Image (tube, rainbow, N blue to C red):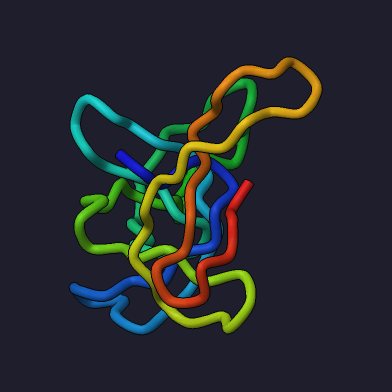
Amino acid sequence: MKIKKNDMVMIIAGNDRGKTGKILKVFPKSNKVIIEGINMRKRHTKPTQKNPQGGILEKEAPINASNVMMLDPKTNEPTRLGAQIILDEKTGKKKRARVSKVSGEMIQ
């Protein structure tokens, strides 16, 4: 899975197609992600000590990672991701960096 938490992504399939948002949580085993404000579902909850009112709450539901595409930091358009091996100046070790296929820009 090439996308990580706090990445800006665009939805490319499903009901929310074309919307963008920040990844809140990643589930690598099930290949799903939760995106801020996307795929909202209503949850009927009983009153509890934490939420004494109860009622209907809206929260984000997971979406398959294949339905999202990373946004290029330079052009702000959807892009595929590649990997590039770079040499870390501080430690002298090789590191793997994510690279945008559109602009060639490195993504932290």
Front residue of 25/2: it is 2
In percent of width and height, residue 38 lies at 41, 64
In the image, taking residue 39 as reference, residue 29 lies left or right, namely left
In the image, taking residue 10 as reference, residue 104 lies left or right, namely right
Front residue of 84/9: it is 84
Question: Residue at (54%, 53%) from the top-left corner?
Answer: 7
Q: Is residue 67 above or below residue 46?
A: below
In percent of width and height, residue 108 lies at 63, 46
Question: Residue at (26%, 51%) from the top-left corner?
Answer: 65
Q: Is residue 64 above or below residue 79?
A: above
In the image, taking residue 95 as reference, residue 43 lies left or right, namely left
What is the number of callouts on the image?
Answer: 0
Q: Quadrant of residue 44?
A: top left
In the image, taking residue 46 as reference, residue 73 lies left or right, namely right
Question: Residue at (45%, 45%) from the top-left corner?
Answer: 84
> Which residue in the rendered view is the most extreme toward the right?
90
Quadrant where the N terminus lies? top left
Question: Residue at (47%, 48%) from the top-left corner?
Answer: 55
Front residue of 41/61: it is 61
Q: Quadrant of residue 14?
A: bottom left
Q: Is residue 3 above or below residue 68?
A: above
